[in-house]
Image: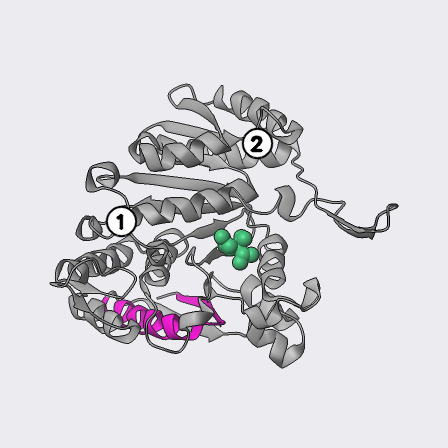
């Protein structure tokens, strides 16, 4: 039995508590499915800044490169807001994504039946929503050069970033979206701002070009402002959403709310040559950290994605997802999900136990 090596990055804020719960669930599931898994925990984000003055220590990066998969909770804390950019937790995450060339970020948005009343939108609107955001993750305005701050000639300060994409970068992420659509409902909607931005114009041209190779997939384009509106107006129109780094960041938080809480959304960041990184879409929520209030489900669903995609353990992944549904059907809710008084409020730890009971 081959042993899978998983690097756990528990990070900051609610990170350690949701990691504890997720690890416990993984231990139960690996025992049940007779998998051999070794966990390696490494410092990352704010925690790593405290320990070694950098958010992504070399040792953590090497461990990630030598693993079968990386499972990350969340990073970030307001106490680093005034630190120089290279000493901020977010910079560590961007560096990890870019060092591992994880250019494709897959964010599935699926409404779980039991949570239909938790969404801030009407039931009729969110019912049966099942879409995937494919976000380009190692290019665009997050990484574009030049960027920085200068003293402008008029005396004040000026700051700037560059939104840039090469045709190769657009082509490879487009292919990921079309391939995914092939296994689903054969629809790709590409989101850009081609009415204003040159970079979006190239984006649109390349996506159209790639679509020639996928004759059975229906391609549409939306401007990002319209897409933000369409996601709330009629989310069921979307199957696979293909978009750039910044637009994908924004659109996926918005899409998360369809499911009732951002605490429900997992993600996978994948490349071609390195292990994948699996992480919840939400942040480190420092305001509720250490209070046993966090919803661990997004991280647990990320662990399920990891089992399915990186370890090819489909049954184990399904087992986790079903257990989550059952716990929710029995009415257990963390505070972010509670929508009426008949539901049973539980903390992070108890939610983990309720899910384990269903495995
Ligand atoms: C995300 C996060 C990150 C991003 C931050 C923490 C750097 O918001 O994964 O969506 O902007 O990509
Ligand atoms: Mn984000």
Name above or below for residue 93 compared with residue 237: below
Task: Pinpoint residue 7: horizontal percent, then vertical percent.
Answer: 48, 68
Image position of 350 (left or right of 102): left
Which residue is denoted by mark 1 in the rendering?
119
Quick check: marks 2 and 1 in contact, CB under 8 Å? no
In this view, the residue in front, 314 or 280, is 280
- Range of magenta residues: 3-32
> Most extreme residue toward the bottom, as rendered?
51
Instruction: State left or right for residue 50 relative to residue 290.
Output: right
The foreground one among 50 and 66 is: 50
Q: Is residue 244 visible?
A: yes
- Where disc 2 sits, the SS reads helix
The quarter of the rendered structure image containing the C terminus is bottom left
CB of mark 1 near ligand 2 (< 8 Å): no
Q: Main secondary structure of the magenta part?
A: helix
Q: Residues within 10 Å of mark 1 (few under 14, many from 20)?
A: many
SS assignment at label 1:
loop
Q: Toward the viewer: 285 or 75?
A: 285
Q: Circle 2 sits on which residue?
A: 171
Residue shown at 74% from the left, 45% from the top: 145
Q: CA distance from mark 2 to mark 1?
A: 35 Å
Which quarter of the picture shows residue 287? bottom left
12 inside magenta stretch = yes
In reply to whether residue 5 is colored magenta, the answer given is yes
Q: Nearer the viewer, mark 2 or mark 1?
A: 1
Up/down of 340 relative to 52, above or below: above
- Which residue is rendered at x = 14% and y = 62% of the image? 331
Category of crowding for the residue at label 2, using alpha-carbon neighbours closer than 10 angstroms: few (below 14), some (14–19), many (at least 20): some
Quadrant of the rendering where the N terminus is positioned? bottom left
Q: Residue at x 57, y 62 (%)?
A: 65
Give percent across and percent down for residue 103.
55, 46
Query: Where in the figure is residue 17, as x and y percent of width and height?
Result: 38, 75
């Amino acid at each position: 039995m081959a042993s899978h090596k998983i690097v756990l990055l528990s990070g900051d804020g609610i990170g350690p508590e949701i990691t504890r719960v997720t690890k416990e669930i993984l231990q139960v599931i690996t025992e049940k499915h007779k998998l051999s898994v070794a966990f390696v925990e490494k410092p990352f984000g704010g925690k790593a800044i405290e320990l070694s003055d950098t958010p992504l220590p070399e040792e953590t990066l090497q461990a990630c490169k030598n693993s079968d998969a990386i499972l990350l909770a969340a990073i970030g804390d307001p106490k680093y807001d005034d630190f120089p950019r290279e000493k901020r937790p977010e910079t560590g995450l961007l560096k990890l994504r870019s060092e591992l060339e994880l250019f494709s970020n897959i964010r599935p948005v699926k409404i779980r039946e039991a949570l239909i009343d938790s969404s801030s939108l009407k039931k009729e609107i969110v019912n049966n929503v099942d879409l995937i955001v494919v976000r380009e993750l190692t290019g665009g305005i997050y990484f574009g050069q030049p960027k920085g701050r200068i003293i402008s000639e008029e005396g004040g300060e000026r700051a700037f970033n560059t939104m840039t994409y090469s045709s190769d970068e657009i082509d490879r992420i487009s292919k990921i979206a079309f391939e995914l659509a092939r296994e689903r409902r054969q629809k790709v909607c590409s989101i850009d701002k081609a009415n204003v931005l040159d970079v979006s114009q190239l984006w649109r041209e390349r996506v159209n070009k790639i679509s020639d190779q996928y004759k059975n997939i229906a391609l549409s384009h939306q401007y990002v402002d319209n897409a933000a509106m369409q996601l709330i107006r009629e989310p069921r129109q979307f199957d696979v959403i293909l978009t750039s780094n910044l637009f994908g960041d924004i659109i996926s938080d918005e899409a998360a709310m369809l499911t009732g809480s951002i605490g429900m959304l997992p993600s996978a960041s994948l490349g071609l040559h390195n292990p994948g990184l699996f992480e919840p879409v939400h942040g480190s929520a420092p305001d509720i950290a250490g209070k046993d209030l966090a919803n661990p489900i997004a991280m647990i669903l990320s662990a399920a994605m990891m089992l399915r995609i990186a370890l090819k353990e489909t049954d184990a992944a399904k087992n986790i997802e079903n257990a989550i549904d059952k716990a929710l059907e029995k009415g257990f809710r963390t505070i972010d999900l509670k929508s009426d008084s008949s539901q049973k409020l539980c903390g992070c730890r108890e939610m983990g136990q309720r899910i384990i009971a269903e495995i």
